[in-house]
Amino acid sequence: MSILNLTINGKPYGPFDVEPGMPMINFLHEYVNLTGTKFGCGEGVCHACVVIIDNDDGTSTTHRTCISNVMLFNNQRVRTIEGHAEKNKVGEIIALHPVQDAFIKNFSFQCGWCAPGFTNETVALMEKLKKQPIAKDQVETVIEETLGDHVCRCTGYVKYFNAAKELILTTKGLTI
């Protein structure tokens, strides 16, 4: 057994005594009841299980939780799909994150299984662009590079792509 401590969506968790070979997605579902992260392929191909790790230097990286050992996340700050919407003092959602809102307005998903991965990846991209804006003519390429490995079996990639593009182009400070 291994001891795990981490912060998820701003809340500290731990210490937990966990099996060292456990995938992170199992920990999220079984130990902290955060089931928004979806198990898709189990091989790291579909990216439905992506979460965000906030690094000490202020940057963020995304990680697939179905193929990542839980101990990779020890002492890390993790964000899941449950952490993006704005909530009031009693935990009720009062406003969606702009990425979530854009995906809903553009009918980006049907079943929603892939939505957490697409959302987390796009949130991380927008945060990166706030620090390092790109030229407007690079937006499509950057979105393709960022979301291109994600799989949606219902609506496909185009609706997510279009929603992300519209959001990036209309959010001040992301492009130059």
Image: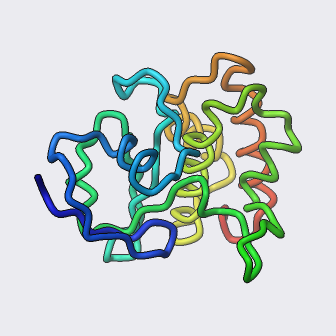
Image quadrant occupied by the C terminus: bottom right
Residue 125 lies, in percent from the top left, at 55, 55
Residue 144 lies, in percent from the top left, at 57, 34
Q: Is residue 68 left or right of residue 161?
A: left
Query: Hey, which quadrant is residue 21 in on the image?
Result: top left
Q: Most extreme residue toward the right, as rendered?
A: 105
Residue 38 lies, in percent from the top left, at 53, 36
Residue closest to the eye, 27 or 57 = 27
Is residue 29 positioned above or below 96 on the image? above
Q: Is residue 66 left or right of residue 105?
A: left
Q: How many marks?
A: 0
Query: Hey, which quadrant is residue 162 in on the image?
Result: top right
Q: Is residue 81 left or right of residue 24?
A: right
Is residue 115 positioned above or below 45 on the image? below
Q: Most extreme residue toward the bottom, as rendered?
A: 89
Q: Residue at x 32, y 68 (%)?
A: 6
Q: Residue at x 30, y 34 (%)?
A: 67
Residue 134 lies, in percent from the top left, at 58, 58
Q: Residue at x 61, y 57 (%)?
A: 82
Residue closest to the eye, 90 or 67 = 90
Q: Is residue 111 left or right of residue 34?
A: right
Residue closest to the eye, 143 or 64 = 64
Q: How is the image coloured?
A: rainbow
Is residue 166 positioned above or below 77 on the image? above
Q: Most extreme residue toward the top, as rendered?
A: 153
Q: Residue at x 74, y 78 (%)?
A: 90
